[in-house]
Amino acid sequence: MSNWKNFERRVADIFGGKRIPVNGRAELDIDHAVYGIECKYRKNLPEWLFGNAIKQALQGSRKRGIIPIVVIGKYNSPDIFVLTRVDDFLNATKEESNEKQT
């Protein structure tokens, strides 16, 4: 079984979704009620982003006990993206969900 399929299964398990098998579609990789999950599995990731920036966010957040995120924008684009570790994301959304229920 290929590594990217295993990665998609792992992501589906983490988020409580179901992997959608490839069938020439232009859809998401994981079927989930809340999140639109598209998986990208690469051998190498940009060091400036996944090494330097995330490391800086982790170090700065650890001291204060807050959630580390990296916010990314492209020059002359209105789009803004957030990068964080999956465990931090799930903990943050779980806390938010618990706050809404009380």
Image: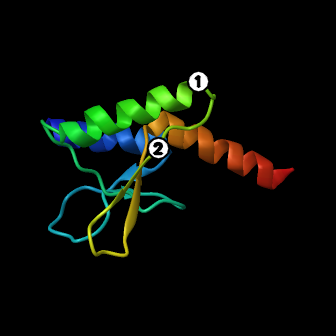
Give the number of the disc on residue 19: none
Q: Residue under circle 1?
A: 63
Q: Secondary structure at mark 2?
A: loop
The image shows residue 1, relative to residue 94, as above or below, that is above
Q: What residue is rendered at 55% in x and 41% in y?
A: 90
Residue farthest along the right direction in this orientation? 102
Query: Is the C-beta separation of discs 2 and 1 under 8 Å?
Result: no
Q: What residue is rendered at 36% in x and 30% in y?
A: 55
Q: Residue under circle 2?
A: 69
The percent coordinates of residue 87 (x first, y second) are: 50, 34
The image shows residue 79, relative to residue 63, as above or below, that is below
Q: What residue is rendered at 24% in x and 37% in y?
A: 6
Name the image quarter holding residue 72: bottom left
Side (left or right) of 23 relative to 14 = left
The percent coordinates of residue 82 (x first, y second) are: 42, 54
Name the image quarter holding residue 42: top left
Q: Secondary structure at mark 1?
A: loop
Q: Real-space Cα distance between discs 2 and 1?
A: 14 Å
Side (left or right) of 6 relative to 88 = left
Under mark 2, the amino acid is Ile
